[in-house]
Image (spheres, grey):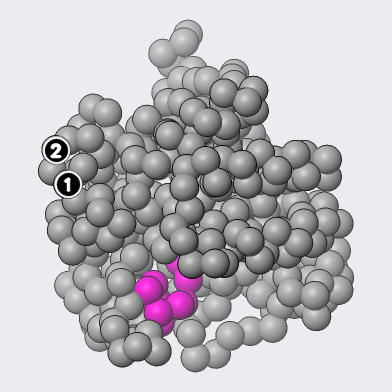
Amino acid sequence: MRAFGDLKIGCTGGGATHRDTDIPDIATKVRMVKEAGVFDYFDRSPPDEEFRDLYKASERYDLPVLASGWFYTLGRDEPLYERNIVKARLLGSRVHNVQVLIEHADGHVLTDAEVAEFYLRAHDFGMRHDVVPCFEVHVNMWSEHFGRVERVAALVAARGVPFRMTLDHSHVIFKMDNPAEQDVQGMRADVEAGRVILDPARPGNVCGRWIGAGFVAHAHARAAIPANPVNIRARHPDGSFGRGIQYPFVRPEPGQYHAGWDESRLEPWKRVVRDLFAFHAREPASPLGQISCEHIPPVDYGAGAGYSIFEQNVACAKWLRAEWAAAIRNTEETSG
């Protein structure tokens, strides 16, 4: 039977800031996360110049760095991945979140076989350092077409290796009822034909399939709603607005968010968390060990927001703790 401590709840380094205009140094971030009293760990892959300060802050505030993550272009960044795994091991991380951009360094779109081959190499190197690589579902990555995840997982499994992923389901939820976003990587036809099901209330939905297959070893918690409003308070260098993959978890004050706020619209996002926790509570083989709160300040997320990004993460962590406790109780009642 699962115990409460079988799931750790943390905060990413990017989420330890109130706004995008005033980013604290790494020691301040660690202190903020520790003093909030609701987080078990810090989630960060430090650049070389920050490594020593993060190591010292982790020890000073007795806050482990249990998770890390970075993004990689294949054909260029394989050595960077290995350096990050070594740093993760030195910091005591047990998972490394891996974002693989959709294009190879030479410009071609990665095939499923290429992603699977990198996964196998990444898994081998990571496990030699006791750090599990978890490939993330994320925009701008190979996995933005969600139908590819199970195909890559099957290629990996055929080689006798378990597929482990990071579930950040905000990237799924914001594409619900959002044809323009579904058009990215040509997924809209698969959604309309029922080959890719986004709604977590429907049988066969992608999040449910990934959870049920035991793929999810790490997760990110950033709230989003169907057809999430684009971020009109921030623009990319090309002038486009942020894609809108973040919604305040708790009600912002008037003027702090650029659109209306309706708590009921968070239900699809919350449902996935409950499904994930229910699976982890009842399945001894579930590989999930931790979930990182990740309301963050970049353009596609919370840039320009008037609300405190960190306070949203604190509120989310409190909710996650309550939901995990409920999942344990429900499992005990049904098994008893």
Whole-percent x and y of residue 197? 23, 38
Which range is magenta? 294-304
Residue 26 among magenta residues: no
Q: Is residue 259 left or right of residue 212?
A: left
Q: Image quadrant for the N terminus?
A: top right
Examine the residues drawn in magenta and state their main secondary structure: loop
- Indicate whether 236 appears above or below 149: below
Mark 2 highlights which residue? 193
Whole-percent x and y of residue 12? 59, 63
Give me the residue at 40% from left, 61% from top: 139
Residue 41 sits in which quadrant?
A: bottom right
**Of the pair 14 and 260, the residue shown nearer to us:** 14
Mark 1 highlights which residue? 189
Q: Which mark is residue 93?
A: none
Helix, strand or loop for disc 2:
loop
Give me the residue at 49% from left, 91% from top: 21
Q: Is residue 78 left or right of residue 142?
A: right
Helix, strand or loop for disc 1:
helix
Q: Is residue 28 left or right of residue 308?
A: right
Q: Are marks 2 and 1 in contact (CB under 8 Å)?
A: yes
Q: Amino acid at mark 1?
A: Ala
Whole-percent x and y of residue 141? 45, 58
**Of the pair 162 and 252, the residue shown nearer to us:** 162
Crowdedness of circle 1 by 10 Å Cα count: few (<14), some, many (20+)? few
Q: Amino acid at mark 2?
A: Ala
